[in-house]
Image (cartoon, rainbow, N blue to C red):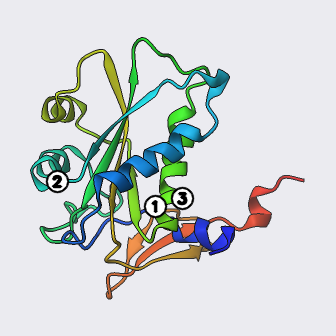
Amino acid sequence: MDFLQLVTTSRSYRRFYENEPISRETLRQLVNYARLAPSGSNRQALKYYVACDKELNDKIFPTLLWAMYLKDWPGPEAGERPAAYIVIVQDENYKMAAGIDHGIAVQTIMLGAAQMGLGGCMFANIYKDKLREALGIPETQEILLAIALGKPKETVVIDEIGPDGDIKYWRDENQVHHVPKRKLDDIILN
């Protein structure tokens, strides 16, 4: 897969083949990719919680807010839920230099997952107190992002933003997920 294919394949998937397991070793590999990615001032301020067993996954799932633009959709049904999760935290003893390391880490993990034939969805909208309790995360660790992972069970396509300028993703009658993107010429200023 060339890099353009990798980037266009790395979409936000929200429905998965829940019965297709992801091993702890696969999650460790994905975290290793993030560990090796650039870090502001090389602070390496991030730590990770990984989950790939049903009991822990069932605790994490209700702490995430799914697809804010799809108002009538509460999230994937049983059987279509993620097979694994990675939660990114920052320990109070380690501070990010520029506050962007978790963005670099999550994108690196998502690209790695796409290369492995997996899909994911990153979450910043999290019931953090509930997630903290579910995972036993100490108060000294700030929850930054969560990533849901699995083998995608849906098709996600990139569309050009229409004349109305609407950026909201949507699903058609066949449950194909559409993601509008701006034209390249519209975002390059010179």
Residue drawn at 35 percent across, 78 percent down: 154
Residue 178 x %, y %: 46, 75
Task: Tell which tag, 3 or 2, sits nearer the viewer.
Answer: 2
| Residue tagged 3 | 111
Residue 72 picture quarter: bottom left
Q: Which dot marks residue 159?
A: none
Residue 129 x %, y %: 19, 28
Q: Let me know if residue 190 appears in the view.
A: yes
| Residue tagged 1 | 113
Residue 169 picture quarter: bottom left
| Residue tagged 2 | 53
Q: Let me know if residue 161 appears in the view.
A: no
Q: Is residue 178 above or below residue 100?
A: below
The reply to whether discs 1 and 3 touch (Cβ–Cβ < 8 Å) is: yes
Q: Residue furthest front?
A: 25
- Circle 3: residue type: Leu
Q: Is residue 140 above or below residue 11?
A: above
Is disc 3 placed on a helix, strand or loop? helix
Q: Is residue 173 above or below residue 149?
A: below
